[in-house]
Image: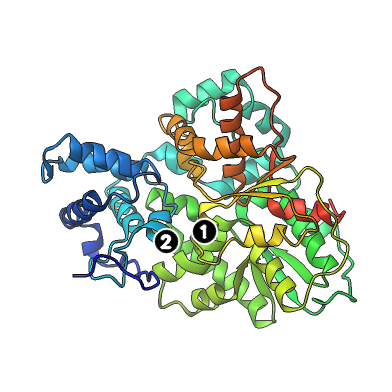
Amino acid sequence: MREGSLEAPTRHKLDWQNPDFFDMDKINAEMHRVFDICHGCRRCFNLCDSFPRLFDLVDESPDEVAGVKVEDYKQVVDACTLCDLCFMTKCPYVPPHEWALDFPHLMLRYRAAEFQQGKAKKLDQQLVETDRNGKIASFAAPVANWANNNSLVRKGLEAVAGVDADAKLPKFNGRTLVLRASEQPLEINTTAPGYGRKVALYATCFANYNNPEIGMAARAILAKNGVETTVVYPRCCGMPQLEQGNIARVAEHAQSVSAALLPYIEQGYDIVALVPSCALMLKFEWPLILPEDEKVKQLSKATYDISEYIVDIASRVGLAPGLQPLPGGVTLHIACHARAQNMGQKAAEMMRLIPEPDLAVIERCSGHGGSWGIMKGNFEVALKVGKPVARQANAAAKAFIASECPLAGDHIVQGMERLNGPDAPKPADALHPIQLFAKAYGLS
């Protein structure tokens, strides 16, 4: 028996169309097996709150894992944010090791069984309908943003929907990225080394409805570097539904989005996602959910994260001149879903292309965990998990704060504010690194 695996981790497909996948007795048996291994290892004690909860249950049990009640397994499942870091960076027993642990996908399987049994909260399901909610809010963005920042409204939302009144919620924008891009054509720099490339920017629900500036910055940078772009947004990638365990719905999203993007691939376009969670879905999660779907396979091979794509241009042919230093430096948080893509710190590599880089890189979970981190009962835990990141950001004291994950960026700033106290100057708002790269080009 090997102690650990030295090979690169490999992932097995999600066998969600097999009825055994949803069999709770079999799930609980696998939970017991995995928890027993985790208890004996404990390398993941400092990741998300799932592992402290598990180890507390074991330590308080009269007979270690055997004494943990099956009904208490849910405490561990509910704390998992599906960040994938335990699988990608910590666990020595992932496949191809014979023990074949995949902790996040086991937590997902448990949630999928609960969802199939009708145990998922109806209000939680409505909160993650990002396309519907984004379309509605974009028609009345000033009202939606006022409500998100009104203490009375937020207390009501907390009482009705369980969204913590103190958690910062993303703003909505009345003019979506798709609309802005259609109204503002860009002149392509035909003298740039990268001239001739074509990119279909997958807008993502966040960039489309909440922060179109991320997409506009990416378009401007790519045009400066000779890249023709078109913005495409068939629908959300389904990550919010994946968090709920609604795998069938994610498969539906994967089929429709891949069908919409395939014609661009056939015309020679690269697909570039603006948010790492969405890139992770297109590259890795969808092929595990629909392993036989040829459109999904082609899309997976053609997809880049935006930072990854800029670095690819720089490494292959070089960037267009014009980058200038960013005075005061940058604190850069590497998002968990960027790390889970197994591509290295592409955002950090990109920022180091700026002359005289003054960069502090933080590679640790912010604690936010998508829609998980805004919920009552989770928000304070999320701040606790993210406290080391907030401390590092405070200590770095750079002029700019950036995170590849916009939700994580806001959460880090909230954590910094908590540490500094109400009377301290507020830190700068967090930006996506692509926005800072555009600023370095003088394009923002």
Q: Front-most of 222 and 26?
A: 222
Position of 50 relative to 107 (above/below): above
Q: Is residue 410 left or right of residue 217?
A: left
User: Label 2 belongs to which residue?
Assistant: 88
User: Label 1 belongs to which residue?
Assistant: 339
Categorize mark 1 by other alpha carbons within 10 Å: few (<14), some (14-19), many (20+).
many
Tell me which amino acid carries mark 1: Arg
Categorize mark 2 by other alpha carbons within 10 Å: few (<14), some (14-19), many (20+).
many
Position of 348 relative to 321 (above/below): above
Q: Earlier in the sequence, mark 2 or mark 1?
A: 2
Tell me which amino acid carries mark 2: Met
Q: Is residue 98 left or right of residue 441?
A: left
Position of 254 relative to 72 (above/below): below
Question: How far apart in space, not on screen, are marks 2 and 1 (Cα)?
Answer: 8 Å
Please state the horizontal and vertical placement of residue 213, each as a whole percent of the image. 75, 49
Q: Secondary structure at mark 1?
A: helix
Q: Is residue 337 left or right of residue 420?
A: left
**The image quarter in which residue 3 lies:** bottom left
Q: Is residue 425 visible?
A: yes
Q: Is residue 251 left or right of residue 22?
A: right
**Residue at the spot x=32%, y=56% of the render?**
103
Please state the horizontal and vertical placement of residue 5, each as a whole percent of the image. 31, 69
Pointers 2 and 1 in contact (C-beta within 8 Å) = yes
Q: Is residue 119 visible?
A: no
**The image quarter in which residue 319 lies:** bottom right
